Image: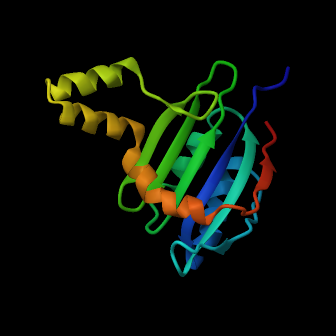
Amino acid sequence: MSAVMTRGLLFVHSAPSALCPHVEWAIGSVVEKRTDLDWTAQPAAPGMFRAELSWVGVPGTGAKLASALRGWAHLRYEVTEEPSPGVDGARWSHTPELGIFHAMTDVHGNIVISEDRVRYAYETGAGDPAAVYHELSLALGEAWDEELEPFRHAAEGAPVRWLHQVG
């Protein structure tokens, strides 16, 4: 019987050079395999470096990767995990200023907001459209998207490395 597998992407949008080996070590501890990322200069943040990794592993690997990288100063990253049988997809975004954001995603990568979160936005808004808008903006992670967008554009055309985890 084979284990259910999924795949995803890790985008390290910016890391200082001194942190790059530690990022590789943290990733390796999650996937139980040494990783040697192809670090390139990050044009959106001079002096910083960026790397991408496509991974295959058991469901939950994305959460483990996001947790392993969480909390380091000056590190910006995103992790995605595709849906798999019985498991929703997910996205994690992290910036030094905002911390970590997590959302469930559909098969196309769109953020899915739960009924409870929508109800919370209505209740918190108490009839004030601006307050409802604010809560829905938080639920969608718009502040993280705004901060990370310049780093995403700087990565266009960059190489992606594949890593397969033995399940």
Name the foreground residue: 142 vs 51: 142
**Residue 107's spot in the image, x, y percent?**
64, 28
Q: Residue at x 59, y 78 (%)?
A: 17
Image height of 127 relative to 66, above or below: above
Choose top left, top right, bottom left or bottom right for residue 42: bottom right
Quadrant assignment, res 11: bottom right
Residue 53 placement (x, y as % from top left): 71, 55
- Residue at point 46% right, 40% down? 102
Would residue 115 be found to the left or right of residue 4 on screen? left
Q: Is residue 74 above or below residue 1?
A: below
Quadrant of the rendered structure where residue 154 is? bottom right
- In this rendering, the answer to whether 116 lies above or below 26 is above
Q: Residue furthest bottom?
A: 47
Residue at horizontal 58 percent and vertical 61 percent from the top: 153
Write the residue at 63% across / 38% down.
81
Q: Position of residue 106 (x, y in %)?
A: 58, 27
Query: For this rendering, which residue is in front, 78 or 133?
Result: 133
In the displayed orientation, state which residue is furthest to the right. Answer: 1
Q: Quadrant of the C terminus?
A: top right
Quadrant into which the N terminus falls: top right
| Side (left or right) of 138 relative to 100 | left
167 vs 111, left or right, is: right
Percent from the top left, x then y, of residue 5? 75, 31
